[in-house]
Amino acid sequence: MKVAVLVSGGGTNLQALLDAKAAGRLPEAEFVSVISNRKDAYALERAKAAGISAEVLSKRKFASSEEYDIALRDLLLAKGAELVVLAGFLVVLGPAVLQAYRNRILNIHPSLIPSFCGDGAYGLRVHEMALARGVKVTGATVHFVDEGTDTGPILLQKAVAIHEGDTPESLQLRVMQEAEWQLLPKAVDLFTRGKVHFTNGIAWIDEQDS
Ligand code: GAR
């Protein structure tokens, strides 16, 4: 299955996907394109190092969000993408992309949704929110993307303990190491092998693969 990955930053989650592919753990996933909204995203270098087409589609080049949405959809379709993975992509998707890829867009979020998610909850801020609230367990979630912010069907979650003395940075790194870099390749593997189905808007993994 052809997979496109959308990025905005460092791309450690993209790297986890590329490493899983190189290790033979994503037999049905073919990475056809990495697209960034920022030209300085280090994720672009990671894609190039792996021999994958890397492109920049900057919002600033478009007169409106609607035009950007349509251009992104057209680029994804031109690449033949069948699954779209948001790996730290910080642009909110519009209706053109969402309609073309209904239940075919995965996002990784660095908390246990529905905690610490929604508008304004991204990157380091999510960990600042978790520490400020004093929760003892956080984690990461892979979910499908719908019209809301972090509201789509949940596919995988993994819990991570919070330690006394954690900073947003130390917590971000532990959530990545213990949860994100494992969950995202696993989600892509399950989806590309046809192991995910939906019942009444809820995502399920076929039992023998869970
Ligand atoms: C990751 O922690 C990801 O979960 C988060 O941005 C980071 C990107 O890191 N995404 C969100 O907060 C989305 N709401 P990366 O570029 O190194 O993969």
Image (cartoon, rainbow, N blue to C red):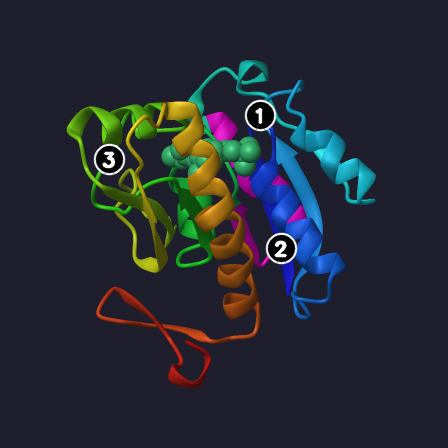
Task: Indicate the amino acid at tag 2.
Answer: Val
Q: CA distance from mark 3 to mark 1?
A: 24 Å
What label sits on residue 37 in the rendered view? 1
Q: Identify the residue at image location x=77%, y=41%.
A: 53
Q: CA distance from mark 2 to mark 3?
A: 28 Å
Q: Which of marks 1 and 2 precedes in the sequence?
A: 2
Residue 17 percent across, percent down from the top left: 63, 51
Frontmost of labels 3 and 1 is 3
* 160 on left or right of 105: left
Q: Measured along the vertical axis of the image, is residue 68 above or below residue 64? A: below
What label sits on residue 117 in the rendered view? none
* Extent of the magenta region: 67-85
Residue 105 percent across, percent down from the top left: 46, 52
Q: Which residue is mark 2?
A: 3
Task: Indicate the amino acid at tag 3.
Answer: Phe
Task: Indicate the amino acid at tag 1.
Answer: Asn
* Residue 207 is covered by the magenta coloring: no
* 22 on left or right of 35: right
